Image: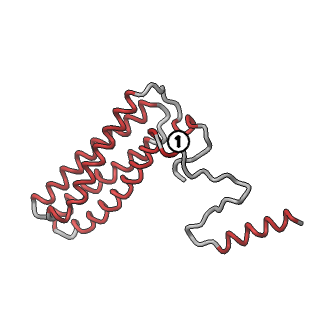
Amino acid sequence: MAKRHAKSQRTDDLRNADSATIWRPSSSCQQVTNGPDLDQGPYMESRIISQRTFRFAIRITKLCELLRKKGWTGRKIADQLFDSGTSIGANCAESQGGQTKPDFTARLAIARKESWETVFWLKLAAATAVTTNDQIAWELDEARQLRAMITQAVKTAQSSSSRGGNRRNDRNDGVDPDV
């Protein structure tokens, strides 16, 4: 009877959950919230870069929607900016699935190159009066900060003694960094 009641309670919890509630730890589960494995090292750095590049891609997407309304030049710049600006995050995300250290660093190096291109298109948009420096100040600053963070991540990866393998499985702690 106790097992049936527990299953019924979980089902009720799921029905009553809002869209942000997926799983609630029970008292018998140990919840991992922080610690050396989650707060430090290249995994935390990669997670921060991934989160910031995702937010950056959202901002770039919205900016491109505005630029496309600014005539032929705005549309051309918006197309290029969209490709390079969103590619930074896509390549950082892809690096997380790298099977070897060279694969991981190659994806980050591409993301770094895309950040250079993104800065170029942002500056061109302001220089051609498609937008103003004030309207793109956050995006320019963030693109430069992301480039610096990615550059440091590449340097760290290249100088580490780890030989690679599947980065997610290297931790062997059962914690998925995407959760």
Q: At 85% across and 62% down in the image, what residue appears?
A: 3
- Given the current orientation, which residue lies at the most extreme front position? 35
Q: At 62% across and 43% down in the image, what residue appears?
A: 174
Mark 1 crowdedness (10 Å alpha carbons): few <14, some 14-19, many ≥20: few
- Asked if 7 appears above or below 121 in the picture, the reply is below
- Asked if 115 appears above or below 73 in the picture, the reply is above
Circle 1 sits on which residue? 36
Q: Which quarter shows the N terminus?
A: bottom right
Instruction: Indicate the position of residue 26 as horizontal and vertical percent values.
Output: 70, 60
Residue 61 lies left or right of residue 161; in this view the side is left
Instruction: Indicate the position of residue 145 as horizontal and vertical percent values.
Output: 28, 48
- Given the current orientation, which residue lies at the most extreme left position? 128
Residue 81 found in image quarter: bottom left
Q: Which amino acid does label 1 sit on?
A: Pro
Q: At 72% across and 59% down in the image, what residue appears?
A: 27
Instruction: Indicate the position of residue 69 as horizontal and vertical percent values.
Output: 21, 70
Residue 57 found in image quarter: bottom left
Q: What element carries label 1?
A: helix
Residue 66 lies left or right of residue 8; in this view the side is left
Instruction: Indicate the position of residue 166 as horizontal and vertical percent values.
Output: 53, 35
Q: At 52% across and 31% down in the image, what residue appears?
A: 165
Residue 56 lies left or right of residue 141; in this view the side is right
